[in-house]
Image: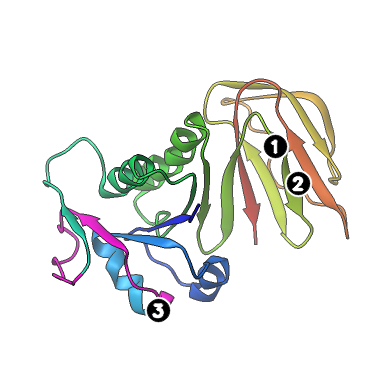
Amino acid sequence: MRRCVIVGNADIKEYECVKDALKSDDFFIFCDGGLKHMDKLGVKPSLIVGDFDSASNPHMDVETITLPCEKDDTDTFYAVKEAVKRGFEEFLLTGVVGNRFDHTMGNISILLYLDSLGKKGTIIDDYSEMEVVSDKPVYVEDGYSYFSLLNMTGCAKGIKIEGAKYPLEDGEITCDYQYGISNEVLPGGKACVTVEEGRLLLVKVF
């Protein structure tokens, strides 16, 4: 199954980092002002979604869904829901972490939404790569500067970290005590993170 890549309106400075993560058969959804990244990413949209309050409708010869300005879903969240309806199982989001903290948090929550549906979601920005750890082990390769585990959903229990500078056995991280920040993969190795109960946001820092 092809992967769905969703491009938002937030600034991207490290285009090469994003381009390295793209695949030739990805399905690209550009959201409204995210179209400003099209040329620098060197890809064409498979679908355009937006209310076009950030950019004008380009009227390209591409399937376009025009949304009302007043709605519950952001353009990005609508794009994700549309891709879910079309059967995509894997998602990569970029241009979704930026100056608007409220939009950034809303976009990060998309990873939780996708995880709740049993789908894989990843966010790449200029500094990091993010995904959710829930019912399956997640591995962190050597080469990242740091990795952090953050709780966004209440309480995560039975946390195990192996192959890292700061290992953990049967740990618990709550939203009001985030002690899982700035861990490191042991040189030449690979860290493994598992959670028995709850979910964590894994942030891998470049």
Q: Secondary structure at mark 1?
A: loop
Q: Is residue 96 left or right of residue 150?
A: left
Q: Is residue 10 left or right of residue 190?
A: left
For badge 2, the amino acid type reads Asn
Give the CA distance from mark 1 to mark 3: 35 Å
Task: In the rendered structure, find residue 84 and report the number of the disc placed on it.
Answer: none
Give the CA distance from mark 2 to mark 3: 33 Å
Q: Which residue is mark 1?
A: 180
For badge 3, the amino acid type reads Lys
Q: Which residue is mark 2?
A: 183
Q: Secondary structure at mark 2?
A: loop
Which quadrant of the structure image shows residue 48? Answer: bottom left
Task: In the rendered structure, find residue 40 and report the number of the disc placed on it.
Answer: 3
* Depth order, front residue of 57/180: 57
Q: Which residues are magenta?
A: 41-61
Residue at 41% in and 41% down? 105
Q: Is residue 123 above or below residue 43?
A: above
Residue at 83% in and 41% down? 166
Q: Which of the two labelled residues, at mark 1 and mark 3, occupies the earlier sequence position? A: 3
Percent across and percent down for residue 68 are 11, 46
For badge 1, the amino acid type reads Gly
What is the magenta segment's predominant secondary structure? loop
Q: Which of the two labelled residues, at mark 2 and mark 3, occupies the earlier sequence position? A: 3
Residue at 15% in and 59% down? 52
In contact (CB < 8 Å): disc 2 and disc 1: yes
